[in-house]
Amino acid sequence: MTLHQQTLTKCKMNYYLTFIFMIVSASLFGQNKSTPIPIKWIDNLTGDFSFSNLWDFPNGVEVKQDGRAGCSDDGFCPKRCYAMLDSNGIVLKDSVKIFYQLLDTTHQVHSIQCDARCYEWDGTDFIDVLRKTKDSVHCSTAYGISTHCSLQLGITNNICFATIELNSIVDKGSATYYCTDGSISIDKNLWQDGIMKAEFNFNFKNNENPKKPIYWKGKIYAKIKTI
């Protein structure tokens, strides 16, 4: 076999191995209907990631008239907390200790800045990044009071699979939308340090209304958690 033939054989083997890897990865994440998106690794991903300096209270918590964190009016507080409030929603003095043992007022740092066109979407500032195995990570954006769809990213080595999960409030409205094309860049150095700093732009197939495109784009800065 000549050197040229050996080179061609090696290229074909690499192609088939990559193709098989992409199929297996898709199967592992249950996202074989999504187009696999190659990850572009950047030594130092630049851009404005200042959103990661912002924070919010958890759902159901807001600052009250007395300047302290308390229950908002959306009903997301623990049920026992509502019995400890006066007519203005302020915590009764004799209930302060137990109230703040029940209510989580932890500052939640923003981990995503994004824009999307999807059904029942009103924005989100949070994404969980969980390491499943040595070579795989799963990401999912948080639902909210008015946001019932979530961006799901399955990352294995150099491939990313993206889907949108719609948990609709409309009867039989829940659906999964699969990525058709897009791009994602990830900071390689921070990734090795356990932080996902990324910029992405994905498009999704809309079976209900093909003329109405669905997309999700933005930036991520989040700690990679271990299960």
Image (cartoon, grey):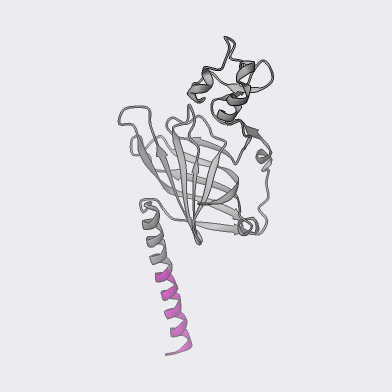
Q: Position of residue 67 (x, y in %)?
A: 69, 20
Instruction: Specify the farthest residue to the front.
Output: 94
Please say if 164 is above or below 193.
above
Is 161 in the magenta?
no
Please give the name of the residue rendered at 58% of the width and 53% of the height, measured from the top-left corner. 185
Provide the residue span drawn in magenta: 1-17
Instruction: Specify the farthest residue to the top.
Output: 87
Which of the two residues, 92 or 146, is positioned nearer the viewer here?
Answer: 92
Q: Position of residue 72 (x, y in %)?
A: 56, 20
Is 4 in the magenta?
yes
Please give the name of the residue rendered at 43% of the width and 67% of the height, measured from the top-left corner. 18
Q: Position of residue 176 (x, y in %)?
A: 37, 41
Rendered image quadrant of residue 50: top right
Please give the name of the residue rendered at 30% of the width and 31% of the height, measured from the top-left corner. 172
Instruction: Specify the farthest residue to the left.
Output: 172
Left or right: 51 in relation to 72:
right
Rendered image quadrant of residue 48: top right
Quadrant containing the N terminus is bottom left
Which of the two residues, 90 or 146, is positioned nearer the viewer here?
Answer: 90
Q: Position of residue 66 (x, y in %)?
A: 68, 16
Main SS class of the magenta portion in the image = helix
Which of the two residues, 8 or 196, is positioned nearer the viewer here?
Answer: 196
Q: How many marks?
A: 0
Please say if 4 is above or below 104.
below
Please say if 51 is above or below 94.
below
